Image (tube, helix red, strand yellow):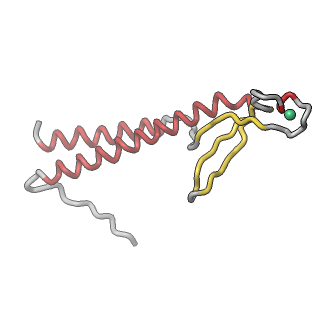
Amino acid sequence: MNQIEILDKLQAHKEQILQQIRELDDFRQGSLSPRYRKCGKPYCHCAKDGSKGHGPHWLVTRSINKKTVSTTIPKEKVEITYHQIDTFHQFQELVKEYVETNIKICDAQLKEPQGPSVKVQKKG
Ligand SMILES: [Zn+2]
């Protein structure tokens, strides 16, 4: 394969990745986990040894500027939320691959003696 073919192949791969990103379902960043709480009433079942407490109460947490932000997830939305988090991970993988493909394109361009002309978008 010559450089032009390699570049064409890489450009096509970039398009393919973008298409996959476009087709992703809605996603959210964060981690989902069940929480249990003790209500504090001494005679409640939750006060007994070994009791997890009341719940579960589902929370999605993520950190924004080093602060943890949490969102309550209703029980009936737990499954879809797991799917949304999985989809976010797919998105991250695709972005990583997109970045790597771009680097390969730049590397391949370095090997071209003439090189493709650089398309610089001028603003204004
Ligand atoms: Zn209780």
Which quadrant of the view contains residue 49?
Answer: top right
Residue plotted at (26% across, 49% down) = 103
User: Image quadrant for the C terminus?
Assistant: bottom left
Q: Nearer the viewer, residue 28 or 20?
A: 28
Residue plotted at (89% across, 31% down) = 44
x and y, in percent, of residue 73 in the image: 71, 37
94 relative position to 35: left or right: left
Which quadrant of the view contains residue 71?
Answer: top right
Q: Is residue 121 above or below residue 57?
A: below
Residue plotted at (56% across, 36% down) = 85
112 relative position to 15: left or right: left
x and y, in percent, of residue 5 in the image: 16, 39
x and y, in percent, of residue 66 in the image: 57, 57
For the image, the number of numbered tags is: 0
x and y, in percent, of residue 10 in the image: 25, 41
120 relative position to 21: left or right: left
Q: Nearer the viewer, residue 119 or 107?
A: 107
User: Image quadrant for the N terminus?
Assistant: top left
Q: Is residue 21 above or below residue 46?
A: below
Residue plotted at (29% across, 64% down) = 120
Q: Residue furthest bottom?
A: 124
Q: Residue furthest left?
A: 113
Task: Please state the quadrant of the image where ligand 1 appears.
Answer: top right
